[in-house]
Amino acid sequence: MSLVKKHPKNHPAFGTLFSELWDAGRFFDNEFFQKDWLPAINVKSNDDHYEVEVAVPGWDKEDFNISLEHGVLTISSEQKNESKKEEDNYTRKEFSYSSFRRSFTLPEDAHEESIKAKYENGILRLTIERLAKKNEKSAREIEIT
């Protein structure tokens, strides 16, 4: 009897799939596990207001928490999905959890009391009005008397 060394090529179904993923460093990539997911965010600066858009399709407005503390605006969310299907001889239960947290320091001219939020068509949109611009002071010399 002789010993035969197992090689991934001898088991193509398992060898190529797992070795390619593992060797490429993709086994724990976001394609398989989305633990590091953050939604796309756009920040716009207009003449009279700022606009923050968060792309989160498929969520509900109740899933979001928006807070403001010491000039830092924080948008966070946690979503839990669970489904259970029972048939004659099997039970199938699936669950997933998604969460994110993003914080932004508001500019000095942001009117904190005017922040409004609206969720529509998968976009969470925050509008932050700007404070009225102060009158610009002209430069002048001060005479010493």
Image (tube, rainbow, N blue to C red):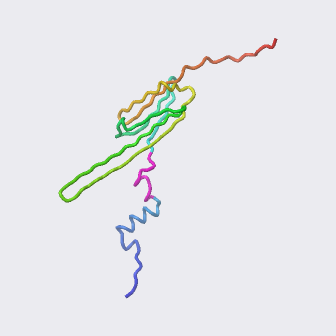
Looking at the image, is 16 positioned above or below residue 67?
A: below
Q: Which residues are magenta?
A: 26-37
> Which image quarter is the C terminus in?
top right
Is 111 drawn above or below residue 140 in the view shown?
Answer: below
**Rendered residue at 40%/55% (across/down):** 32
Q: On the picture, is 132 further left or further right than 14?
A: right
Query: Residue most toward the right?
Result: 145
How far from the left and from the top, in percent, is residue 93?
28, 53
Count of numbered circles on the image: 0
Instruction: Indicate whether residue 97 is drawn in magenta.
Output: no
| Depth check, front residue: 6 or 144 | 144
Q: Residue at x 22, y 58 (%)?
A: 90
Please provide percent x and percent y for residue 87.
19, 55
Q: Nearer the viewer, residue 82 or 9?
A: 82
Residue 5, compared with residue 143, is above or below; it is: below
Q: Residue furthest bottom?
A: 1
Give me the residue at 40% from left, 81% from top.
4
Magenta highlight: main SS: loop
Measuring from the top left, give residue 46's x and y in whole percent.
Answer: 50, 26
Question: Which residue appears farthest toward the front when viewing the image?
Answer: 69
Looking at the rendered image, the quarter that the N terminus falls into is: bottom left
Q: Quadrant of residue 13?
A: bottom left
Quadrant of residue 16 within the rendered picture: bottom left
